[in-house]
Each structure stands twice: as C-alpha cells, then as structure tokens.
Amino acid sequence: MPPATCADLSIDLIDGAEYLGPTPKLFRVGASPSIAIGDGILDVLDRKAPKSRFDCPAAEIAAGRGYLVLYASTTELGAFIETFGNRRMVTPAERKDLELGAIGLSRPLKLIDLHSPAIVRLYEQLLDEGVCTIRNYWLTWAWSAALHRCAPDADGLIYRAREAGEAGESVALFSDRARDFLLRDGPSVPVGDVSLADTQRLFVKMTDIKWAK
C-alpha cells in the first residue's frame, strides 16, 4: 500500500511535452471518444464504483473526495493495444461502435511519472513494484488516491501499461483538474476504418492477435 502520509511520498511532476512532442495530443478508443472532451467528460465517465486501474476508490467517492479518470495513450497504436491487447482475436462484433478519438491540449500537462526513480524506490520498499501492471486493482486504486491527494498540481499519471508496453505511454488524467483544457482534435474514427489500416497491421504484428474480418 502507498505511504499513509504525504510527507512520506516524494513526488516530482514532469512536463508532458517530454512525451507528447511539439504538437501534443492523446488518443483513446471508446464508444464515443469525442464526447469525453471538455464539458462532456463527466457525462461519459460518471460512475460510482471504481473499475479501471487508477480509478478513484469507492471510499473516497463516498467521503465526497471523488474524482473521475480519463485513460488515453500517447500513440494510436498504444490506444489500440490498451483496448484490445488482452484478447486472442478482435471480432467485428467486439469493435462495433468503437472509435479512435484524438484529444488536443490547450496547455502542457503536469504529470506524475510512475516510473520515476523516487516512485520506483517507494514501490520496492513497499513491495508494490507492479503497480502499473498488477491485476490487484485494490492496490492501484489506493495509489491513485494517495497521488491525487498529495500532488494537488498534478493533472494525472503517465506510465507504461501492461498491454501497451513500448508501443506508447499511457496517461490517466484526473478529471477534476484536466477537464477544462482537453480539446477535440478532429472527428473520431471507427477502429475498423480503412484510414487506420496501418495501425491495425502494426497492432497484429506486435501482439499476434488476429484482427478478424
């Protein structure tokens, strides 16, 4: 588990431009990615119980300290792998209604690098070194709450996801801080669209997962 007090949690924020380049944007696959931008983010992500890796724990929500999390990747391929990487085959039915959306940013992100030396040392001391890949989400929810509480200037987390690996960094944005500067970057595109053929081929090559016709 993470340290009980913020004094024991050393956090350095990084400039997201280090990962996103001169024209920063993020990518995510979802039922309607373009809706989860700006004012619509809470409408899409509103739920009372945690589900994904760095969601807010239910106890924080019940205590009125809840926040929502928007998951995205620094690359199109990373978004594909994060979404479909735990399957053996991606069928037309599974990808029906799913779209790839690009998210622009009106200002640089301030992120907590979960692979920074200071954070990694804490994982090792606390035997939590798998927090970015472990399947015990009770542990990762606790880390999310501690980092959110102890780094009030952080927009979110950046990490290498279990499925995506080196295909792109994953980002988990805290909606209470990030919602005002996320911008729609063009229309979203169905994941089966011919314009994403190169990304589909790379996905199959890297994962050995069949992309069924």
Image: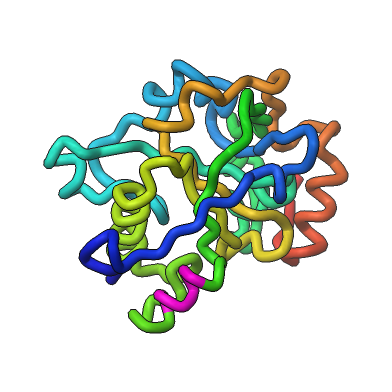
Q: Identify the image quadrant of residue 28.
A: top right
Rendering coords of residue 155 (x, y %): 48, 40
The vertical placement of 115 against 189, above or below, is below
Residue numbers of the magenta segment: 118-123
Considering depth in this image, is 111 or 61 the residue closer to the camera?
111
- State the quadrant of the C terminus: top right
Report the residue at 66% width, 27% height from top.
104
Q: In the displayed structure, does residue 179 sit left or right of residue 160?
A: left
Image quadrant of residue 88? bottom right
Measured from the top left, where is residue 189 in percent x and y?
71, 27
Q: For this view, does 136 lie left or right of residue 153?
A: left
Outermost residue on the top side: it is: 39
| Drawn side of residue 31 relative to residue 194, left or right | left
Tell me if residue 73 is in the magenta stretch.
Answer: no
Quadrant of the rendering where the N terminus is positioned: bottom left
Q: Residue at x 61, y 21 (%)?
A: 183
Q: How many marks?
A: 0
Residue 5 % position (x, y): 23, 63
Residue closer to the observer: 105 or 132: 105
Q: Residue furthest front?
A: 7
Q: Is residue 206 above or below residue 66?
A: below
Question: What residue occupies the far left of the structure in this picture?
Answer: 63
